[in-house]
Amino acid sequence: MRLVSLLPSATEIVHALGLGDDLVGVTFECDEPASARQTKAVVVGGRDTRGMTPAEIDDYVRTQMSAGGDLYTLHADALAGLDPELILTQDLCRVCALPSGHVDQALSHLGCRSEVLSLDPYTLEEVLGTFFEVARAAGVPERGVELVGALRERLRGVSEAVAGRRRPKVAVVEWVDPPFTAGHWVPDLVVAAGGEPVAARAGKRSVQVSWAELAAPEPEIVLVTPCGFHLDGAARQAEAVIEHFPKAAVWAIDGDGLVVRPGPRLVDGVEAIAAILHPEAVPAPGERAIRRVS
């Protein structure tokens, strides 16, 4: 089956299911595995924000959306030329990826008959469910069962390791300028890692808040996991958070790799967070996963 992924997390799911050779198109943000963007056709483009500050990125996004503009560009002709049978997209967040409605309109205009599967999880359990969905749509349901089974076994291992231990209060900052609190599946990761999420919105969209609202529950640990950034970028942003939490330990996490993308590596994220919260019970992850900044 010829597959096209219009979001980085779907690209990771496809490869985790052993379907990488069937993937023919990806987005400009698909960087895991590294070979995906290098060897596949890029069918979605967007602005390179690497030289922008968090405030500049936020202003750009707000300006585009208020004007009815698009953050992403679908290269429709390239998509049509790939003749895909299954396209993986989303409606979860306009800031994170191209909405499925744009894809449907393009396919209708081009006369293509590809199946479009929208992946829109809000909880960790729903994220795991999308792996079944992709496997079934790709005609390999047994691979979904195998993948989810292996991930659940790892989650069970963390749960057993932290069982009976005191759960520290944890605040997660998903963006720093302006501050956004944790939403969607992120609070679930904290719970699975043996923590108590505070100032969070489990199963709901992340929203802008004040630093006072984030600090009010007096978190013991603050995790900075900015969308669109890996560890070095997260660590730079975490420096600006320290002054708002003078009594908390502030940690940076590879946000894109371990927390904000709803793919298989969320389980890596649970293990990494557990190593922060309960270092005596859970081994430390690789050096590119987490970093303490205060």
Image: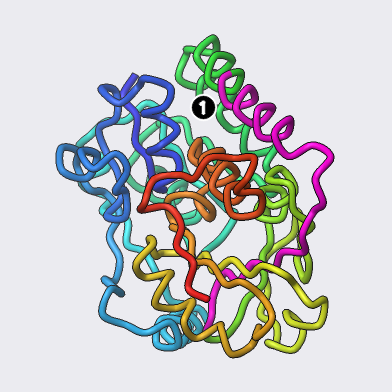
**Residue 159 magenta:** yes
In percent of width and height, residue 286 lies at 39, 45
In percent of width and height, residue 27 lies at 30, 50
**Residue 44 magenta:** no
Q: Nearer the viewer, residue 234 or 34?
A: 234
Q: Nearer the viewer, residue 146 or 92?
A: 146
Q: Residue furthest top?
A: 142
Q: Secondary structure at mark 1?
A: helix
Q: Is residue 161 visible?
A: yes
The residue range painted magenta reads 150-176
Residue at the (84%, 40%) spot, across then down: 164
Residue at the (19%, 42%) spot, across then down: 41
In percent of width and height, residue 29 lies at 31, 55
Splitting the image into 4 quarters, where does residue 28 fall?
A: bottom left
Image quadrant holding the N terminus, namely top left
Residue at the (36%, 28%) spot, across then down: 15
* Placement of 141 over or under 204, stated as above or below: above
Residue at the (82%, 51%) spot, across then down: 166
Which three-letter amino acid code belongs to the residue tagged 1?
A: Val
Task: Say whether residue 79 is left or right of residue 6.
Answer: left
- Disc 1 marks which residue? 134
Q: Nearer the viewer, residue 202 or 214?
A: 214
Q: Is residue 97 visible?
A: no
Task: Say whether residue 115 is left or right of residue 106.
Answer: right
Q: Residue furthest front?
A: 280
* Placement of 203 over or under 58, stated as above or below: above
Q: Nearer the viewer, residue 119 or 204?
A: 204
